[in-house]
Structures are given as structure tokens and as C-alpha cells.
């Protein structure tokens, strides 16, 4: 008799747990993580840039006549090293002036390594086999935050002759993995923040609401607050933990984003990418296949034997206009999905190029309920 109330209570607890799980925001296994959807305030990179010289090129360097700044920079470098070249006939053939770009990642500390990109600014033909000489990298405030140096990894090659030129990739640009050492860190104390703002990379009210619900459900208390379609504020006082610990607890939560319906087409390659939410209202589509062929068949006209005259060329032109007799007017029913749209266009025998024109026409008719992006 005493077991019945306990059994009822146990069943009630199990039922309530099932209800809470059902009402909790669904985290699909394939949904992106929060760290892939937002940018965190304070966790940003800083751009660095520098001007330097690349040496050791095999005759593919800057022409001194066309790039006098290269000679001037090399002369200043040699003078700092104790070599005086003032007044000398200095014509190097293995030096090129370059611009170095890099991004200083957040929380970078002195002694760390970062990747850099090296690009020629003169008339150098290739940076293959070159070595970057020590170059300071400055931020927007003019301060030096890193120093770059090392051999360049160029991914392109160029060959030319008297009548032909062949180039693969871009030989005038390259990279140096870990080619710069950090010398100064950004003055930012992340641990002293009273609140943290999450900025959505793709602002959307539905996605922001799902993020807020997922964070509060996972932490069990109202820590996240929705401010607008692109911003969520985290209250560290309500969380009862530090900023770093809070971010580590929520950044791997999975949330299904609700982005806008988009159709992206690339006219150059004929590529079409349609989002899952793309729908089309009731519309009729006809894909015409009209071909015009113009053929020139000149006919020579010669005089009779032993007759006076000259040979003439009489123009003859054949024009053929053909249209596919199987072309039909297809009716696309209302509110079709992405799969229905692709299946219907393929049934018409439409290629990628013609499909792009059809999508433009459907958008112009007001039947395509998606943002059409043409690249």
C-alpha cells in the first residue's frame, strides 16, 4: 500500500521531464554551433601591414628604372647594416619591393607566430625562391606589433618565350606560414568585462530568439537577453562565473539558424545555389529553343573555254531557323519546395544557363519568394 504513492510520484517526475525535454529548443546533430554563428565582443583580429624587400630572386626582380623605390629601400637597408653604397653604380637584379599583410589574432601574446602574405608592388615577375628580409608590421595606430622574415612559399609559376607565355597561379604573391613573430599584445582585459555581447554574423530575429532560449535553457537561468536581431547580451552577474568560463559553456551549443531564402547564381560558370526555404508561387514557364544558322556557300563562276572574261565569285547564303517542336508551356503549382522546383526544371530539359534566365524571369514576375543574388 505504501508503494503506490511512490510509484505515482516517480511516474509524474518522468512525465514532467519528458515534457521539459519536448519543450526545450531542439538541437539538431547537424546544426551549427553558437561559435559559428556569432562574433564575441573583444574577440577580434587586428590588421597589420608592412613594407619590405625580398632578396634571392633568380632574375625576376624589379626593374630599377621602373621601380626606383626598390633601389632606395635596399640602399637604406645596407647602410643600416654598415655598407655604404652612396654614389655607387648599384643595379641589383634579384631584389623586389613587397607589401606584407597579416592579421593579429585575438589574445595573441609576444613570442607567438602568425601567418603573413607577401605581394609584389613593383614590376617583379615572380617571388619564387625569394626570402623576405626583416620587416616590421604596423597596426592602424602606427605601433609595431610583429616582425616578419623568412622564405616565401609562392604557389604560381610563369614561363614565356618569343611567341607564347604560360602562367599558372599568381607568381607575384606568396605566403610565409608562421613568418611573423608577435612583439606586442593588444591591451584588452577580457576577464574584467561586466557583460558580453554576441553579434550574429547574419542578423535574424528568429535565430537570435533561438540562441537566447538555447543559452538560458542550458545554463538553467536567464543569463542571455535579446536586444535586437543581431545582438544578444550575456549578464555575467546572473551567470555567476567569469567571461572565459561562460563562453566555454555556451559556444558549443547547437542552434538551427533561420536565414532568409536566397538564390545565388554565377553567370560566368553557370552555377546555381538555392536555399532550402526557397518557394515559388503558381506560375507558367516555357523554355524556348530557337536556333539560327547562317552558312556562306560562295559559288565560283568561270568563263567558257577560249572566251574572254574573268572568274567571279558569286555569294550564296543559306539561313536556317529552327525551333524545338517539343517545347511546352509548363505549369508550376503554388508554394513548391526546392526539390519540386529542381525536379520540374530538369523535366523540361533545362540546362544551367537557361535555368538562370528562367529564375530571373520568375523573380521579375513576382513568383520567386527569395532574394536573388547574381554574381
Image: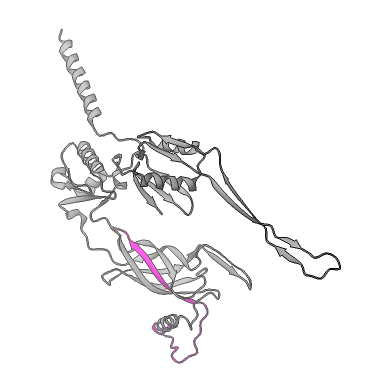
Magenta region: 77-105
Picture layout, residue 350 above or below residue 51: above
Residue lying furthest left: 237
Q: Is residue 310 left or right of residue 128?
A: right
Percent coordinates x, y for residue 169 in the rendering = 51, 62
Q: Identify the colour scheme used.
A: one colour
Picture layout, residue 101 above or below residue 276: below
Q: Quadrant of the C terminus?
A: bottom left
Task: Pick whichever, 63 or 361, lies toward us.
Answer: 361
Task: Pick whichever, 228 or 220, lies toward us.
Answer: 228
Task: Pick whichever, 348 or 132, lies toward us.
Answer: 348
Residue at point 83% right, 64% down? 304
| Count of marks, rendered view | 0
Percent coordinates x, y for residue 95 in the rendering = 48, 77
Where is residue 366, by image quadrant?
Answer: top left
Residue at point 36% right, 64% down? 102
Percent coordinates x, y for residue 199 in the rendering = 24, 51
Does 55 appear in magenta? no
Q: Quadrant of the N terminus?
A: top left
Does 101 appear in magenta? yes
Percent coordinates x, y for residue 178 in the rendering = 41, 62
Picture layout, residue 109 above or below residue 271: below
Amino acid at each position: 500500500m505504501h508503494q503506490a504513492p511512490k510509484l505515482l510520484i516517480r511516474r509524474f517526475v518522468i512525465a514532467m521531464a519528458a515534457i521539459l525535454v519536448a519543450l526545450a529548443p531542439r538541437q539538431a546533430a547537424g546544426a551549427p554551433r553558437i561559435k559559428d554563428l556569432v562574433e564575441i565582443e573583444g574577440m577580434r583580429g587586428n590588421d597589420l601591414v608592412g613594407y619590405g624587400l625580398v632578396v634571392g630572386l633568380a632574375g625576376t626582380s624589379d626593374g630599377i628604372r621602373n621601380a626606383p623605390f626598390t633601389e632606395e629601400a635596399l640602399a637604406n637597408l645596407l647602410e643600416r647594416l654598415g655598407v655604404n653604397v652612396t654614389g655607387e653604380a648599384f643595379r641589383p637584379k634579384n631584389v623586389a619591393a613587397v607589401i606584407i599583410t597579416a592579421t593579429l589574432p585575438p589574445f595573441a601574446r609576444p613570442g607567438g607566430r602568425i601567418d603573413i602574405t607577401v605581394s609584389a608592388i613593383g614590376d617583379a615577375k615572380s617571388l619564387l625562391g625569394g626570402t623576405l628580409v626583416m620587416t616590421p608590421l604596423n597596426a592602424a595606430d602606427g605601433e609595431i606589433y610583429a616582425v616578419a622574415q623568412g622564405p616565401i612559399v609562392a604557389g604560381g609559376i610563369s614561363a614565356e618565350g618569343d611567341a607564347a607565355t604560360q602562367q599558372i597561379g599568381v607568381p607575384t604573391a606568396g605566403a610565409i606560414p608562421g613568418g611573423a613573430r608577435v612583439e606586442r599584445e593588444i591591451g584588452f582585459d577580457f576577464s574584467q568585462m561586466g557583460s558580453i555581447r554576441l553579434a550574429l554574423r547574419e542578423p535574424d530575429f528568429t535565430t537570435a530568439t533561438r540562441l537566447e532560449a538555447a543559452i538560458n535553457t542550458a545554463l538553467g537561468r536567464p543569463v542571455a537577453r535579446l536586444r535586437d536581431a543581431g545582438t544578444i547580451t550575456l549578464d555575467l552577474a546572473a551567470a555567476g562565473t567569469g567571461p572565459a568560463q561562460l563562453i566555454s559553456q555556451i559556444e558549443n551549443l547547437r542552434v538551427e539558424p533561420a536565414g532568409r531564402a536566397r538564390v545565388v547564381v554565377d553567370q560566368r560558370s553557370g552555377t546555381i545555389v538555392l536555399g532550402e526555404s526557397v518557394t515559388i508561387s503558381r506560375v507558367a514557364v516555357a523554355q524556348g529553343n530557337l536556333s539560327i544558322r547562317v552558312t556562306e556557300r560562295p559559288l565560283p563562276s568561270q568563263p567558257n573555254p577560249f572566251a574572254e572574261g574573268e572568274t567571279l565569285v558569286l555569294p550564296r547564303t543559306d539561313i536556317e531557323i529552327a525551333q524545338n517542336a517539343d517545347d511546352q508551356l509548363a505549369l508550376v503549382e503554388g508554394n513548391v519546395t526546392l526539390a519540386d522546383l529542381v525536379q520540374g526544371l530538369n523535366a523540361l530539359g533545362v540546362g544551367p544557363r537557361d535555368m538562370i534566365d528562367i529564375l530571373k524571369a520568375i523573380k521579375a514576375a513576382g513568383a520567386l519568394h527569395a532574394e536573388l543574388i547574381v554574381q
